[in-house]
Image (tube, rainbow, N blue to C red):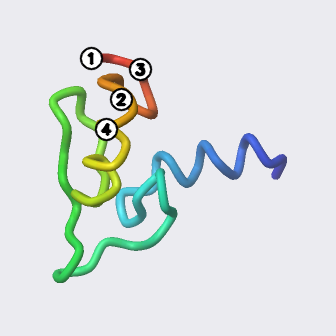
Amino acid sequence: LTKSESMLSLIDDEDACPTCLDVYTPENPKINTECGHHYHLACILEWMERSKHCPVCDKV
């Protein structure tokens, strides 16, 4: 797989956060956004301090 193919498979992975690439755990669970993507709460909150757009699909 190329690097971009690997990243796309990670983004589609329901068990890992696409921003930090760590798996979801009961202590650090998956949070779903309105556009249907998932992140750790801390990851998406940190992202939203810089941007109002989803890091995967760029929707607001």
Outermost residue on the right side: it is 2
Which class describes the residues within 10 Å of circle 4: few (<14), some (14-19), or many (20+)? Answer: few
Q: Classify mark 2: helix, strand or loop.
A: loop
Which mark, by number, is residue 58? Answer: 3
Q: Nearer the viewer, mark 4 or mark 1?
A: 4
Residue at numbered disc 4:
49
**Disc 4 to disc 1, how far (Cα)?**
13 Å
Q: Earlier in the sequence, mark 4 or mark 2?
A: 4
- Whether label 4 touches label 2, CB < 8 Å: no
Identify residue for label 1: 60
Q: Nearer the viewer, residue 37 or 1?
A: 37
Residue 52 image position (x, y, % from top left): 30, 24
* Identity of the residue drawn at 18% across and 82% down: 27
Contact flag, marks 3 and 2 (Cβ < 8 Å): yes
Tag 3: residue type?
Asp
Callout 2 touching callout 1 (CB < 8 Å):
yes
Judged left or right of residue 8, residue 13 is: left
**For the residues marked 4 and 2, what is the alpha-carbon distance in whole angstroms?**
12 Å
Q: Amino acid at mark 4?
A: Glu
State left or right for residue 34 relative to residue 20. left
What's under tag 2, amino acid-wise? Cys
